[in-house]
Image (cartoon, rainbow, N blue to C red):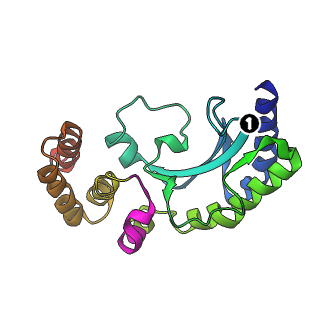
Amino acid sequence: MTDNKEIKKDILVELSSQLTKYGFKKKGDSFIRETESGLYQIIDIGLGRSTTIKANHVGVGFGIATEEWLNNLIKWKRPKILTSADCEIRDCFCNLVPISDETIWYPISLGLTPLINKIDSHIQKSIVPYLDRIKTRHDIINMWRQHQHDIGFAEGRQLLAIGTLMFLTGDKDEGERILKKLIVDNKDNSYFTSTINKTLGQLSSSH
């Protein structure tokens, strides 16, 4: 595993020079760019767990987080460095990004240079073009209106995420309608009711 970690480290160093031109900065095992205040686009490089079929593989993923989601929808302690696991829009739920020629998980046995080339190609041809389409909250809301579940929200959370974003930053009336309906539809779900009531109370309490 030590060798695998060294390979991942080398991949991160090589990708850093490529992703800098797109505005990403390396932080830990992630590359992050803030495309508008409080909106973060994240690309991760990770190793597969040794107890799974992804052992001895390296993978690439991405996500999008906003302060509205981080402050209202995430219940665990905010980490110092954000990863795709902290995002509401995530690669594993997105149906709008073309899968690479083989998979987003690549066997380390390929060797360092082929690994870098494959990961770099997938990022530049698929991930960055997608992220470039949604650099603002307005972009996210518009894409959701066009594609809804396909843009990368987890099943069961898409209305909560988009309703929160709309209410706090976009179309307040539509966001409020979505969130209030969610309370009715999920009245026995304490997470939904407490989270939504907290969100709905923010604007009224600030006036």
Residue lying at 66% horizontally and 35% vertically, measured from the top left: 28
Residue 150 within the magenta-colored segment of the rendering = yes
Residue lying at 14% horizontally and 41% vertically, measured from the top left: 188
> How many residues crowd around disc 1 within 10 Å: few (fewer than 14), some, or many (20 or more)?
some
Percent x, y of residue 36: 50, 57
Percent x, y of residue 82: 53, 39
Percent x, y of residue 62: 58, 51
Percent x, y of residue 180: 15, 55
Residue where numbered disc 1 is placed: 56
Residue lying at 24% horizontally and 61% vertically, measured from the top left: 175
Quadrant that contains the N terminus: top right
Residue 37 is left or right of residue 104, and the answer is left
Q: In what element is the residue under mark 1?
A: loop
The segment highlighted magenta reads 142-154
Extreme residue in the top direction: 2
Extreme residue in the front direction: 53
